[in-house]
Image (cartoon, grey):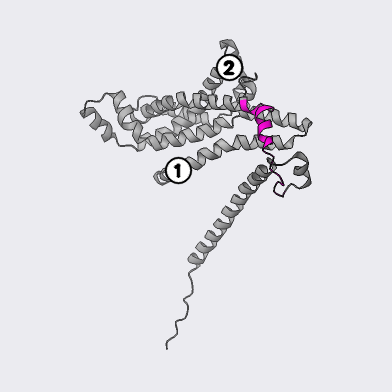
Amino acid sequence: MACHRPQPREPAEVGGDLNRFLGKVLLIAFGISILVPFLWVLMSSLKTGNEIFASPWTPPKSPQFGNFARAWSQGNIGATFFNSIVATVGTLAFLLPIGSMAAYVLAKYPFKGSKLILNSFMGGLMFPNFLVIIPLYVLLKDLGLLNTKLGLILVYIAYSLAFTVFVLSGFFEQLPNELIEASFLDGCTHAEAFWKVMLPLAKPGILVVAIFNAIGLWNEYPLALVLAQSDNVRTLPIGIATLTNNQQYAGDWGALFAGIVIVMLPVMIVYLIFREQIQKTMLAGALKG
């Protein structure tokens, strides 16, 4: 009976296995670094203050769901939660149509100076927002929009427009011009070709832009801290910062962790619902790039 001696493996094949192994180790370590703090915060939100300090790594003996009620009402998280919803939804309602139209024109109707305008939007991505806080404060004060939801929404639209136009212009550039010409033959105007033909085809990109903008607006802190100082306008990140300061004196750490969970929960739900769409779109963008 003939024996088959194992063939020596090529160095490139051994190196590939090592890279895949190291990649898996890094992914597992990254997953643990995200999952462990989240589970710890979730457990702490169901404990009493004394239990958090006495046994920080053990599950709660008796879940304290009252922590969420105190964070929602006494910590004023409920009001700031509503303000964040208004600011985020109100911004997206205006941002997505404006950003889509601007990106479509810059991608499909090139004119003298269009590249300069698109590069200006790209430059806006690298412009730190804290440099414009003082001019924005003075401008909103002069317009009578300081400490108002409308003023905050207008600032958020301008703040998010650069990212929106930059991403969507790439999606519109990938769509064939023949579709526009075909819509003209069917009797569509330029506006109808955009709304009825091109915009539905760019739906994956619009969805991803909406999700990333929503997450960024939900967690936005510096602009809201300066431009929304009254109680009826403060957003959730400001509410959590206020709750943190108050609970340090009150010693109600359970309510503080419950407030943190309330902040994280909507973002996680949105991501879990649309995670497959996000992954497909990001992968498609990477392959096209």
Residue shown at the point (62%, 23%) measured from the top left: 234
Work out whether 5 lies above or below 29. below
Residue at x-position 36% and y-position 27%? 105
Badge 2 or badge 1: first in the primary sequence: 2
According to the picture, the residue beneath numbered tag 1 turns out to be: 282
Q: Which residue is at the far front? A: 62
Judging depth in this view, the residue of 240 and 6 nearest the camera is 240
Q: Name the residue beneath numbered marker 2.
A: 148
Mark 1 element type: helix
- Residue 114 is at least partly visible in this image: no
Q: Is residue 68 left or right of residue 155?
A: right
Q: Which mark is residue 240?
A: none
**Image quarter (top left, top right, bottom left or bottom right) of the N terminus:** bottom left
Per the rendered image, the range of residues in magenta is: 57-78
Circle 1 crowding by C-alpha within 10 Å: few under 14, some 14–19, many from 20: some
Identified at 71% across, 32% down, the residue is: 244
Question: Are there few (<14), some (14-19), or many (20+) residues within 10 Å of tag 2?
Answer: some
Q: Secondary structure at mark 2?
A: loop
From where the camera sits, is residue 249 visible?
Answer: yes
